Amino acid sequence: MITALTDLGQGFVVALQPYNLLMCFCGILLGNIVGVLPGMGVMAAISILLPLTFGMSPVAAILMLAGIYYGAQYGGAICSILLNLPCHPPHAVTCLDGFPLTQQGKGGTALGVTIIASFVGASFGITEMVFLAPILVRVALNFGPAEICSLMLLGLIAGSTLAKGSPLKGIAMTVLGLLLGMIGTDVNTGISRFDFGLLQLDNGLEIVAIALGLFGIAEFAKSINRMAPVNTRYTNVRMRDMKPSRAELKQAFLPMIRGTLIGSLCSLIPGTGPTIASFVSYAVEKRVSRTPERFGHGAIEGVACPEASTHSSVQGDFIPTMSLGIPGDSVMALLLGALIMAGITPGPQLVTEHPDIFWGLIASFWIGNILLVILNVPLIGLWVKLLSIPFRFLYPCALFFICVGVYSANNDLFQVGETLVIGLAGCLLLFLGFHPAPILLGFVLGPRFEENFRRAMLVSYGDPTIFFSPICAVILGLCALLVGLQVFFWLRRLRNGRHPDHANLFSDADAASSAGRPIVEVE
């Protein structure tokens, strides 16, 4: 414990360096703006800004990208409560009680409780990372290639089967990501694979091209002509309106704690993410409430619980990502890709070889969340006014930055065309109901999975029983459990006469993701 606190102190020294502090501030500011604007997803924003990190130090780059991720959660709550506009899926559940509170004239109170709940949830998630991540690292350092390969498999299965929509489609997208990760020169044999005779593909596909194509071009194209004018009738909130009464704080306290604990537990399961955490916590809170009929009609608990859960989950997602190298969701996969591009290998070695990145990132979480509270309290009106920017102006600007960012990566026009092709393919996948997020997961984890699998086979002289060690057996058992649960829920839905295509372990979270599309009131 003392060692962790000492390392955290060194992290504050790194995070408080002027340049790193500036990048952290820029990240959370951009994240807040992204959270407010409909159609501007976190993945798209990080993908667009990813090329800018090439000239930065790895510490400043990861601080800025992480700030965008957790900063967007604050902005998303503002639109959900004041405008009934869940710009991002995790905040779809906040609309259920947040907007009714706004209609009752308590929008400011809901925002005040949200900021408190968000800070409490984030603080617990950061504390969890401080003490739990080093323990996981010490355990993982004893892992051999077979154990690491099993962990990668768990991350791939969890990320695909727990993705929104059909689990089979999620698995198909993960396999597609694995195939894309095989393009290029094989490290072990030096033979080019799946490059179709194109010299430009000898080094494989660029993660920048995949991220910008799937989450820049495709996601923006999906939102064209879907943005209606926003009703800002309830957005006149003053700072004094945001102070909740003592009774309201007492009412929100226990739900806040329960949501924080649920979010932190969900974050330790690869593939869940904040969307599932927020809906699970809301469902639990409604179940334990003595007056469940109040939910959906302006219950303050219905705002405090999911928001605390969302922020606890967002911060906790960094635990398996940074300590084990297993991304919890597609955003974490993109952040891992950013580390790999900077020449840093994610995983247990990150903590020992690059403590400035690991502990600097944790310290920046505290700083960033405090800055977010300071930014959000007086600037609520400004964030809402951003919604008046027509989407027809945002989209071409985003495309321009996508083209500039891809070209600036390697000064190669081929990669611009590569991004365009991937973007068009992503549009087709979205049209057919295949969400592309698992592709990125497979692309990032695939090469590491293949490398450790081949290494395990070399060590054991081709004997597959190397995967029957106690640690591998537990991890592979979890993989089988995830698949078995998906099959069970699929059969149960089939028996109940519901369409099995959408069977998922967390079907409520899938509904949340669907509900995450803008819900706007036209004046």
Image: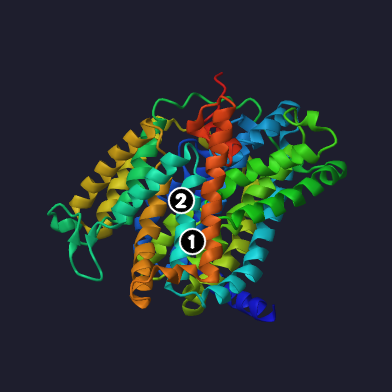
For residue 459, above or below residue 163? below
Residue assigned mark 1: 326
Write down the quadrant of residue 86 in the picture.
Answer: top right
Where residue 347 appears, as percent x and y from the top left, is: 47, 69
Q: Quadrant of the N terminus?
A: bottom right
Where residue 491 appears, as percent x and y from the top left, is: 55, 35
- In this view, the residue farthest toward the top is 523
Q: Nearer the viewer, residue 510 or 482?
A: 482
For residue 324, above or below residue 7? above
Q: Residue at x 40, y 61 (%)?
A: 338
Label 2 sits on what residue type?
Ser
Label 1 sits on what residue type?
Ile
Where residue 124 appears, as percent x and y from the top left, is: 69, 60
- In this view, the residue farthest toward the right is 247
Q: Residue at x 45, y 68 (%)?
A: 467
Is residue 374 something that shows in the picture?
Answer: no
Q: Quadrant of the C terminus?
A: top right
Q: Nearer the viewer, mark 2 or mark 1?
A: 1
Q: Residue at x 36, y 55 (%)?
A: 443
- The colour mode here is rainbow
For residue 125, above or below residue 280? below
- In this view, the residue farthest toward the left is 197
Q: Gap in Å between the C-alphas at discs 2 and 1?
A: 11 Å
Q: Nearer the viewer, residue 479 or 462?
A: 462
Q: Residue at x 32, y 45 (%)?
A: 213
Q: Under tag 1, what secondary structure?
A: loop
Q: Under tag 2, what secondary structure?
A: helix
Residue assigned mark 2: 330
